[in-house]
Image (spheres, rainbow, N blue to C red):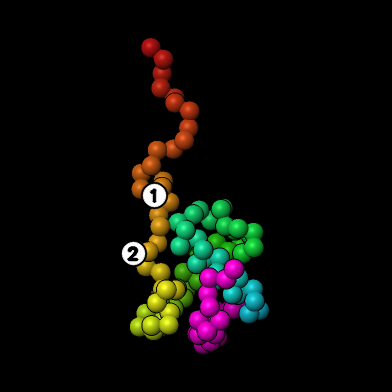
Amino acid sequence: MTTIRDDQWTKIYEFLGQCPGVYAGQETQCRCFIEGVHWVLRTGAQWRELPEKYGKWNSVYKRFARWNEKGIWKKMHQQFVDDPDMENLILDSTIVRAHPCAAGALKKTADKQPKP
């Protein structure tokens, strides 16, 4: 199941083709990468929990981080923020789920309190 409709993907891929310094690579692999990033952001899961169908989690993360350093995600957001066809794809803090540990949840570890 894809999370990005074909018409949305066409717009994204055209945008990436116009971004200097972005290597989009083969279209099917690039779409898989974008959908993997989308999955992580929507679910709030850790990168290590990324399903194999999106690729190796570490490779997806490293590419995500490189694009982040180059400002690609910010440019993409600015490009599509006013496009009503892309509204369910634009991820912001109102729909991104945080992992429980980001909210201060206790770790599931053995109690290490000293015995009296």
Where residue 91 sits, quadrant-wise, is bottom left
Q: Position of residue 8 (x, y in %)?
A: 50, 81
Q: Position of residue 86 (x, y in %)?
A: 43, 79
Q: Is residue 51 left or right of residue 89?
A: right
Q: Which residue is mark 2?
A: 94
Q: Position of residue 70 (x, y in %)?
A: 47, 73
* Mark 1 nearby-residue class (10 Å; few <14, some 14–19, many ≥20): few
Q: Which mark is residue 102?
A: 1
Residue at 46 percent across and 69 percent down: it is 68
- Residue type, mark 2 in image: Thr
**Which segment is the magenta one?**
1-25
* Callout 1 secondary element: helix
Front-most of residues 92 and 58? 92
Q: CA distance from mark 1 to mark 2?
A: 15 Å
* Numbered disc in front, either 1 or 2: 2
Q: Is 68 colored magenta in this rendering? A: no
Q: Is residue 11 left or right of residue 87?
A: right
- Asked whether residue 63 appears in the rendered view, the answer is no
* Callout 2 secondary element: loop
Do the numbered discs 1 and 2 sit on residues whose CB atoms are within 8 Å?
Answer: no
Residue at 38 percent across and 42 percent down: it is 105
